[in-house]
Image: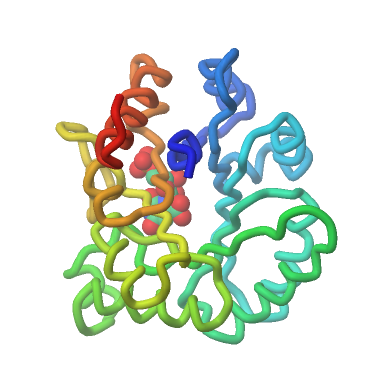
Amino acid sequence: MEIQKQVIIALDFPEKEQAEKMLTHWDGKEKPFIKVGYQLFYRVGPEWVAKRKEEGYSIFLDLKLHDIPNTVAKGVESICCLGVDFLTIHASGGRQMIEAAREAAEKKTSGERIRLLAVTQLTSTDQSMLNDELGIPGTITDSVERYAKLAYESGADGVICSGQEASLIKAATSSHFLAVTPGIRPLGHDVQDQKRVVTPTAAIQNGADHLVIGRPITGAPSPITAYENILSEIKQARGLSL
Ligand SMILES: O=C(O)c1cc(=O)[nH]c(=O)n1[C@@H]1O[C@H](COP(=O)(O)O)[C@@H](O)[C@H]1O
């Protein structure tokens, strides 16, 4: 896979002006893969997203759908017309919900089908939160593996997990099942609210397909420099010459 496509920039902004200003850093360069979460989506709406797609951006729409199967299926049907590349649903919605989402995604007749990524355990969850707050017994990796297998068997295209768990997920499912990993922190960067963090190098070495990165790029003094440094790190981790 092309290295540029491996980094997905999280456009976590409240206003479209800020998101658009951020994208100007890539003027004259290849359009990056971007993630639009609900903070921005609720403000800008579907037209803004569809327009970015027309302009040539690859788009991950991160709406983390989690509801009864019928409601999620209808949501997926509505989103499909935007032509985005990835959409998140929650694995904890269960088999029937994931199957209904997949069935809805299959209804799109023209162009590439949207890829469904199931959130396993959020990268802001650690062992004590899982056991003591959420009351889920066992280790984080057990829980992530269980959700990943469920998502795989139910028709998701991949999962959202920490880079720590990417190789485990591939082994438990298939090498083609996507491991998309947020919680990426270059060496020395503040972890902020993330708990299960890894460096870009570790994520790639563990087999992550895409790295979702927000603040380490968008909060950097020069976002484009931070982005290009991460691309170089990935290139090195993939064993390619710089
Ligand atoms: O679904 C996601 O993208 C997601 C899942 C998860 O477990 N953890 C996680 O951080 N994310 C998203 O990934 C991005 C990470 O942003 P930074 O922590 O700023 O790099 C945010 O937009 C989160 O919403």
In the displayed structure, would residue 219 be above or below residue 123? above
Evaluate whether residue 228 shows in this view: yes
Which residue extends farthest right? Answer: 109
Residue visible at 23% across and 35% down? 186
Residue visible at 55% across and 52% down? 62
Q: Left or right: where does residue 95 sit relative to residue 231?
A: right
Residue 61, x across and y down, in percent? 60, 50
In the displayed structure, would residue 84 be above or below residue 159? above
Evaluate whether residue 10 shows in this view: no
Residue 132, x across and y down, in percent? 20, 76
The quadrant the C terminus occupies is top left
Of 131 and 148, nearer the camera is 148
In the displayed structure, would residue 35 be above or below residue 4? below
Residue visible at 42% across and 19% down? 224
Q: Left or right: where does residue 135 sit relative to residue 40?
A: left
Q: Which colour scheme is used?
A: rainbow
Q: Left or right: where does residue 112 sit relative to residue 119?
A: right
The image quarter containing residue 87 is bottom right
**How many numbered marks have been drawn onto this rendered protein structure?**
0
Residue 169, x across and y down, in percent? 34, 70
In the displayed structure, would residue 207 be above or below residue 12? below
Residue visible at 59% across and 27% down? 31
